[in-house]
Image (cartoon, grey):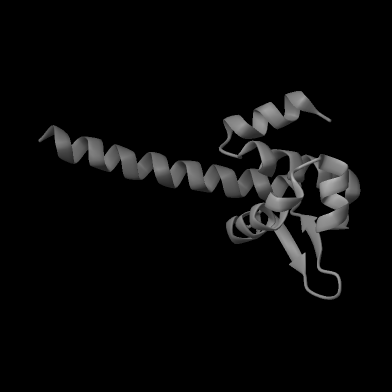
Amino acid sequence: MHTELISKLKKLGFTENEAKIYVGLLSLKEATAREIHEFTHVPRTKIYAVLEKMSKKGYVEVETGTPTCFRRIEPERLAKKLKAEFLLSLNETLKELNSTEN
């Protein structure tokens, strides 16, 4: 798998398994949890919990049905989301630093 890309996503706050799943979904486009597990080798016991967490963060979209399918959001949307989250966190930290200084 794309170890360098996974490493870069981890630097942006992804867990190892989240990064593997997102990168896997770049190739798979849309897949079931089982297909994602088989492609990424993320442990089957963890796959649903990781996908649920990624869904809550907005990194993957869920298509309910039998079986449930998962899609990653477009890389551009992901970049905008990560940038907005980073800037919000940075601004909150800066406010806290400035208020502590007084």
Residue under the point 87% across and 43% down? 39
Residue drawn 74% across and 29% down?
A: 5
In the picture as drawn, the residue positioned furthest to the left comes out as 102
Q: Position of residue 102 (x, y in %)?
A: 10, 36
Please identify the quarter of the rendering in which residue 23 is found: top right
Q: x, y percentage for residue 60? A: 71, 56
Q: Is residue 28 left or right of residue 2?
A: right
Above or below, comparing residue 11 to residue 21 in the picture? above
Where residue 79 sits in the image (x, y, percent)?
65, 43
Name the residue at 59% across, 61% down.
Answer: 56
Residue 22 at x, y percent in the picture: 75, 45
Residue 21 position by quadrant: top right
In the rendered structure, the answer to whether residue 65 lies left or right of residue 20 reads right
Horizontal placement of 29 versus 44: left or right?
right
For the N terminus, the image quarter is: top right
| Left or right of 81 in this view: 39 | right
Of the pair 19 and 98, the residue shown nearer to us: 19
Check the image and name the residue furthest to the bottom: 65
